[in-house]
Amino acid sequence: MTHFFLTLVIICSVFPKSLISSSKDKLFYDAVRAEATGDLLTAIDLYEEASKISKSSNLHGNLANLYFKTEKYGKAVLNYRRALLLEPSNRAFKENLNFALETAGVSLRKTDFSTYLGFSSIDLWIISLATSFWIGALALAFLYFQGWNRKRFIFPIFTWCLLLCFLLWGVYTSTENKRLLSKEVIVIETNENENNATQNIPLRRFAGSGSSANTYVNPGESLWLNLSNHSFLQSHKSLSGQKWFLVQSLGDDKKGWIKSDAVSFLTQAE
């Protein structure tokens, strides 16, 4: 009886995963076939459905290519960026992203962090810091009991402290980059400007369509969500039910309220 229940648990745990995987694969290959026949809109819909089930760099790369072909440059940039988050070293994605940004009239990003300082490297920096601290502390303790005098400790301690400062900087920088990434949104095309992919989208003074514009942004631009003093997302829902976000550029030269459907979060919920 015990073996029966154990087998049942294993089957129940594996079956849903295999079902999800087969569903994602079916959507992906259906999208590839639709793209091959020239039905780009159907292919986009299928890729989008597949991306809700599972993520892969190839999926987002293909989706970005299709959005670029249909002149939806904001969504093309969004998906090239998502593909690079999954595969940072892919040169083709980087080149395509730069071309999409150039075509959309968006200046090349200044916030593409090194792989070594990206959000995925935080654990590596923390482990390196902890390892270096304890190895250094044990080594100094060993040398002390070996009878080293104080003058001989100056260089090893200085080197050890310098290494720890460097690793602390790595932990802080990668953590800050992760924080920025979690707040980053990409401006995308909305129904209001879907017939003109390069049309400017206003950042308004107040959360409402009747408010005047502070400035304008292009599809494909990166903006960051503005947080209150208590680290809460500053948003507002109008009487019509439309949700607005208070956003700003990284250098604070652009700031204002934008409709929630005019932006998409760069990082997707797992």
Image: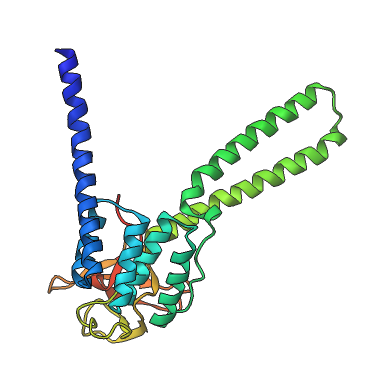
Relative to residue 144, is residue 216 drawn left or right? left
* Residue 246 seen anywhere in this rendered image of the structure: no
For image coordinates 30% across by 72% down, the residue present is: 67
Snapshot colouring: rainbow
Q: Nearer the viewer, residue 163 or 26?
A: 26
Relative to residue 135, is residue 188 drawn left or right? left
For image coordinates 40% across by 54% down, the residue present is: 86
| Residue 251 % position (x, y) | 48, 73
Outermost residue on the front side: it is 37
| Residue 111 % position (x, y) | 50, 66
Relative to residue 17, is residue 215 drawn left or right? right
| Residue 167 % position (x, y) | 61, 46
Please tell me whether residue 52 is drawn above or below residue 37 in the rendered image.
above
For image coordinates 27% across by 86% down, the residue present is: 196
Quadrant of res 193 = bottom left
For image coordinates 47% across by 60% down, the residue present is: 90
* Residue 255 seen anywhere in this rendered image of the structure: yes
Q: Which of 127 and 255 is in front in this view?
A: 127
Outermost residue on the top side: it is 1
**How many marks overall?**
0
Please tell me whether residue 35 is drawn above or below residue 165 in the rendered image.
below
| Residue 47 % position (x, y) | 24, 61
Please tell me whether residue 72 is drawn above or below residue 45 in the rendered image.
below
Q: In which quarter of the image is the N terminus?
A: top left
Q: Which of 267 and 229 is in front in this view?
A: 267
Q: Which of 28 and 152 is in front in this view?
A: 28
